[in-house]
Amino acid sequence: MRRHTTTALVLTTLVSLALTGCSDDSSSSPGASPAAASSPRGTSGTTGATPLSSAALSTRLLTEQDLGEGYVRKAERAQHDDVSVIGCPALEKLGGDAATGASLDFPRKAKAAFTYGADGTSEVSEELYSDTAPKLSAGVGRIFDAMASCPTYQVVSGTTAIDMTAQATTAPKLGEEQWSQLLTYSTGGQRSVVKQTAIRTGTVVVIVAGSPALVDAHLDKALAKAQSR
């Protein structure tokens, strides 16, 4: 089967988290708590609000000080390996360009990634996007639906092949719309679990991904800071 390069939602970010040894359910963080009760996504929102600029979004990203002791911000990668998807037609149809930025196709965006712990093997990343509410809703929903449509498929990053399973999960009842999933990566005899949760609040989408415990611990504060004025 041919490989198709895709710009699907943060695939290269998630692959990076998996390859650096992001642990599964055993990961923990000071202040971590079980995920809040979830609800189906809604359709409400302020459709007439003005989207934020990338510069404004960058000031609303979490920092080491927000996260607490033990977190170190990672430097952004100058280049990304092409990411190919095999065995998931819905994701293959979304592609066409090299996945150089691991981002949604919204021009207004900001991102940050952090390692946690003495060994630095647990990671959490945050991405912020801004556009009109209908565009954000359609764009994020399309990607999450595509990823959830294929329970198993393979991701190839550079020369590394990763077997992947995706499971949609209920998201905490935050913002106007919510999406969440668990992605399990297997490569080289190692297994990693990455949680990815997206919340839309007005004209901003907050995406937190990484170790499930770290995502649960910091999602609320990421959303609160994204909503700050």
Image (cartoon, rainbow, N blue to C red):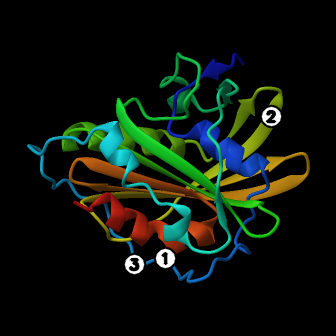
Q: CA distance from mark 1 to mark 3?
A: 7 Å
Earlier sequence position, callout 3 versus callout 2: 3
How packed is label 2: few (under 14 Cα within 10 Å), some, or many (20 or more)? some
Q: Mark 1 and 3 residues: CB-CB less than 8 Å, in contact?
A: no
Q: Amino acid at mark 3?
A: Ala
**Quadrant position of residue 64:** bottom right
Residue at (42% x, 78% y) in the render? 36
Q: Residue at x 69, y 42 (%)?
A: 15
The percent position of residue 184, horizontal first and vertical second, equals 69, 54
Instruction: Report how many numbered discs are placed on residues in the image.
Output: 3
- The three-letter code of the residue at mark 2 reads Ala
Residue 223 visible? The answer is: yes
Where disc 2 sits, the SS reads: strand
Helix, strand or loop at label 3? It is loop
Other residues around mark 1 within 10 Å, as few (<14) / some (14–19) / many (≥20)? some
Picture coordinates of residue 162 (x, y %)? 77, 40
Mark 2 or mark 1, which has the lower sequence index?
A: 1
* Residue identified by numbered label 2: 161
How far apart are the alpha carbons under marks 3 and 2? 35 Å
Disc number placed over residue 74 in the picture, else none: none
Q: Quadrant of the N terminus?
A: top right
Cα distance, mark 2 to mark 1?
Answer: 31 Å
18 lies above or below 174: above
Report which residue position mark 1 lands on: 35
Between 83 and 86, which is closer to the camera in this rendering? Answer: 83
Q: Residue furthest right?
A: 189
Q: Is 28 above or below relative to 179?
A: below
Give neighbour class at mark 3: few <14, some 14-19, many 20+ (Cα, 10 Å).
few
Residue, disc 3: 37
Q: What amino acid type should be assigned to the residue bearing mark 1?
A: Ala
Q: Position of residue 123 (x, y in %)?
A: 67, 59
